[in-house]
């Protein structure tokens, strides 16, 4: 597989089912069109392939990928001062480094002392001031912020930023300037996220602490949250052991974060949304790992947090560390409706000689981003694809369709079905998908 960097997208298509496409957050691997009616994608015509597995119910899934400028890996834990076009980290997708969905990611490690650093899984998602953003995965799929009990991935930025000056103006987060800036022109609406990335961010609501939140006594109240996409943590969330934070308002290394390379930030600090319990002129923030009070008329950095809809996350690809291990860094593939792929006007996959197991696949790439595709790939799963990989499907094969010397948005290509896949099991023992990348 090739390295992809983030200006193109991929569209996937199930052979025997339809698949579609979206975008790898930060690196441009797109995947998925949900809710559209799909048609059967493959009909094997050769006599030898009559036992290919029969028809299955149609399904919608799409996938897309991007270009590959050369880029040198940054030093561990650092963001380079200058980055290539797109500020994207190169990704080479393989069976070894890529998982369907996110459930195989490591959960946060519960700290044993105030000297333990934050440990868990990290993802790159979006860009700020031209640099990639790195987030801590506080919860792979919880319902703490979703009243409808739909699981979501809770992310908290690993870096601190200045967003619109960071002013509160009040210690009520819901009516604060900070909330307005995070969800407006200074962050969410400032081209920080691509359209597919933004569409995967859900509205978060949390009216009171839950049983997993930190129990340490403090002088701060709970910062209620309602229908908000981008927010900052509450004191009780920033002391939640299941999120990887040590349960104390005193110093904890788990709350130390990378400082954004910005001259306005000369110390380690980030705002919280908890109001001071008795003084409306004060809110709360983290300063060098300790939770303290801060004047609502002052300003400091923030650590944006949000929840992602798991049904819109198709793949997680490890770019540093081992898939599933603690402290591994990932790029995500999220749904995108701007590119699709189907079998075109011919509508059938066929073969000339099944003895060599080579299949010819006609394809047609559609949608406003169709011209960005430069390859078609084949993905084989042990089960049908489900939103967010809710059924635990595994990747069995991934390879590029041979389309000859030139690639067009409509054409045909070939691939060799690996020997371990019996044609009679097609659509039953395994499921084959086509992706426009």
Image (cartoon, rainbow, N blue to C red):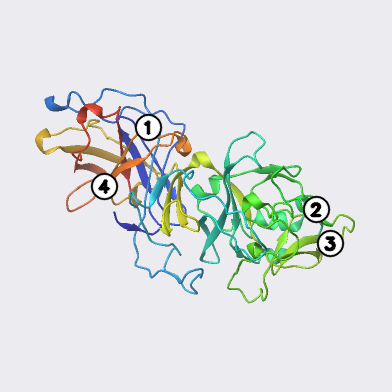
Residue 36: horizontal and vertical position, in percent? Answer: 43, 31
Q: Quadrant of residue 57?
A: top left
Q: Verify CB contact (< 8 Å) between mark 3 and mark 4.
A: no
Instruction: Identify whether 49 is placed above or below 301.
Output: above
Q: CA distance from mark 3 to mark 4?
A: 57 Å
First in sequence, mark 2 or 1: give its number: 2
First in sequence, mark 1 or 3: give its number: 3
Q: CA distance from mark 2 to mark 4?
A: 52 Å
Q: Name the residue tied to disc 3.
A: 282
Residue beneath the point at 66% across and 73% down: 265
Q: Name the residue tied to disc 1.
A: 384
Left-right relation of 289 to 135: right
Q: Nearer the viewer, mark 2 or mark 1?
A: 1
How many callouts does the rendering have?
4
Image quadrant containing the N terminus: bottom left
Residue 220: horizontal and vertical position, in percent? Answer: 82, 55
Judging depth in this view, the residue of 324 and 13 nearest the camera is 324
Q: Name the residue tied to disc 4.
A: 399
Left-right relation of 390 to 251: left
Examine the rendering and report whether any part of residue 118 can be seen.
Answer: yes
């Amino acid at each position: 597989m090739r390295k992809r960097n983030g200006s193109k997208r991929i569209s996937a298509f199930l052979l025997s089912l339809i698949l579609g496409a979206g975008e790898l957050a930060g690196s441009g691997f797109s995947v998925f069109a949900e809710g559209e009616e799909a048609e059967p994608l493959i009909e094997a015509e050769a006599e030898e392939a009559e036992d290919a597995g029969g028809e299955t119910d149609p399904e919608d899934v799409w996938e897309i990928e991007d270009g590959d400028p050369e880029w040198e890996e940054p030093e561990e834990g650092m963001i380079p001062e200058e980055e290539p076009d797109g500020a994207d980290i190169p990704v080479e997708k393989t069976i070894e480094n890529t998982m369907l969905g996110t459930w195989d990611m490591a959960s946060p490690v519960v700290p044993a002392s105030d000297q333990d650093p934050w440990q868990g899984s990290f993802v790159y998602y979006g860009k700020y001031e031209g640099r990639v953003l790195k987030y801590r995965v506080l919860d792979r799929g919880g319902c703490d912020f979703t009243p409808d009990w739909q699981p979501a991935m809770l992310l908290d930025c690993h870096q601190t930023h200045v967003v619109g000056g960071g002013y509160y103006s009040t210690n009520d987060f819901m009516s604060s300037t900070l909330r307005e800036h995070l969800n407006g022109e200074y962050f969410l609406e400032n081209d920080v996220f691509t359209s597919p990335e933004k569409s995967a961010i859900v509205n978060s609501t949390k009216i009171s602490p839950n049983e997993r939140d930190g129990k340490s006594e403090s002088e701060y109240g709970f910062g209620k949250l309602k229908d908000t996409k981008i927010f900052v943590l509450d004191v009780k969330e920033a002391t939640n052991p299941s999120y990887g934070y040590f349960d104390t308002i005193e110093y904890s290394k788990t709350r130390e974060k990378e400082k954004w390379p910005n001259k306005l930030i000369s110390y380690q600090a980030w705002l919280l949304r908890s109001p001071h319990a008795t003084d409306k002129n004060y809110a709360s923030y983290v300063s060098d790992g300790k939770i303290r009070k801060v004047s609502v008329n002052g300003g400091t950095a923030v650590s944006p947090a949000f929840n992602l809809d798991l049904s819109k996350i198709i793949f997680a690809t490890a770019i540093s560390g081992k898939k599933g291990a603690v402290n591994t860094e990932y790029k995500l593939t999220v749904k995108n409706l701007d590119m699709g792929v189907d079998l075109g006007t011919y509508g059938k996959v066929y073969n000339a000689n099944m003895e060599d197991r080579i299949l010819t696949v006609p394809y047609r790439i559609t949608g406003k981003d169709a011209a960005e595709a430069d390859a078609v790939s084949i993905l084989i799963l042990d089960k049908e694809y489900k939103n967010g990989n809710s059924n635990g499907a595994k990747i069995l094969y991934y390879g590029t369709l041979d389309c000859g010397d030139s690639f067009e948005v409509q054409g045909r290509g070939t691939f060799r079905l690996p020997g371990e896949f019996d044609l009679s099991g097609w659509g039953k023992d395994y499921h084959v998908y086509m992706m426009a990348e």
